[in-house]
Amino acid sequence: MEIVDNPQVDTQQTYSLSEVAKYLNVSEGTVRNWERGFSEFLSNYRNRYNHRTFTVEDVQVMERIKGLMESRLFTQAGIKHMLSNRGFTASNPTAEQGITAPVQQATAAFDEEYKEKLLIALNSLGSELHSLRREMREDLKGTLKREIDHLTLLLFPPSQPKKSWSWWKLF
């Protein structure tokens, strides 16, 4: 944990890049990429050694980013859109005071919407799995029937030869 030089952030707990990466179970490079790609949703605090530091709100935003990335339902532009629609705004010293409650509300609303989307996706996958299972069952029935008919002909040949091709002998 690093202490930052910004007087308005001194009272808040901040975390180093490596601590955030370890907490989120991602590489430090991933956190750097998120910081560049989603800079409008993260604060840009540096300590006196010019090391990146992240606030609790930044970590919460990165948790959302990680969840959306892992779901593979959204592109980076889609994640930005989701974050901007959910009340995550650029963190700056004047806007940070009193932001915890709105962020938690936005997080709760986002979680509910995310759960609904996952439920819809799971239901559609379940119905597709059911139809594929039914289709495979029908294919298997047809294949087994043809195999049984073929084996029946091999084991019990007909007593009389088929006369279906004997018409050509008439000419």
Image: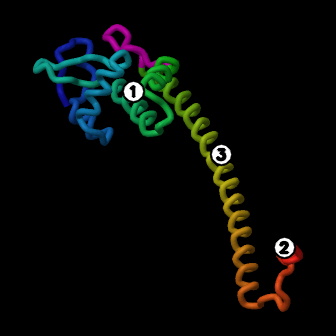
Residue 60 covered by magenta stretch: no
Across and down, in percent, residue 35 comes to 30, 23
Q: Which residue is mark 2?
A: 168
**Residue 97 relative to residue 6: left or right:** right
Q: Identify residue type, mark 2.
A: Trp
Across and down, in percent, residue 26 comes to 29, 39
* Mark toward the start of the polypeptide (3 vs 2): 3
Q: Quadrant of the C terminus?
A: bottom right
The residue at 72%/79% (across/down) is 150
Q: Which residues are magenta?
A: 87-99
Q: Which type of secondary structure does the marked residue at label 3 adopt?
A: helix
Q: Which residue is mark 1?
A: 61
Gap between marks 1 and 3 measured at Cα: 28 Å
Q: Which residue is mark 3?
A: 123
Q: Quadrant of the N terminus?
A: top left
| Disc number lying in front (1 or 3) | 3
Q: Quadrant of residue 149?
A: bottom right
The answer to whether the residue labelled 1 contacts the one labelled 3, judged by CB atoms less than 8 Å apart, is no
Q: Residues within 10 Å of mark 1 (few under 14, many from 20)?
A: many
Secondary structure that dominates the magenta span: loop
Please, is residue 150 above or below residue 10 in the view? below
Q: Which type of secondary structure does the marked residue at label 1 adopt?
A: helix
**Residue 51 relative to residue 102: left or right:** left
Across and down, in percent, residue 69 comes to 42, 35
Across and down, in percent, residue 118 comes to 57, 40
Q: Identify residue type, mark 1.
A: Val
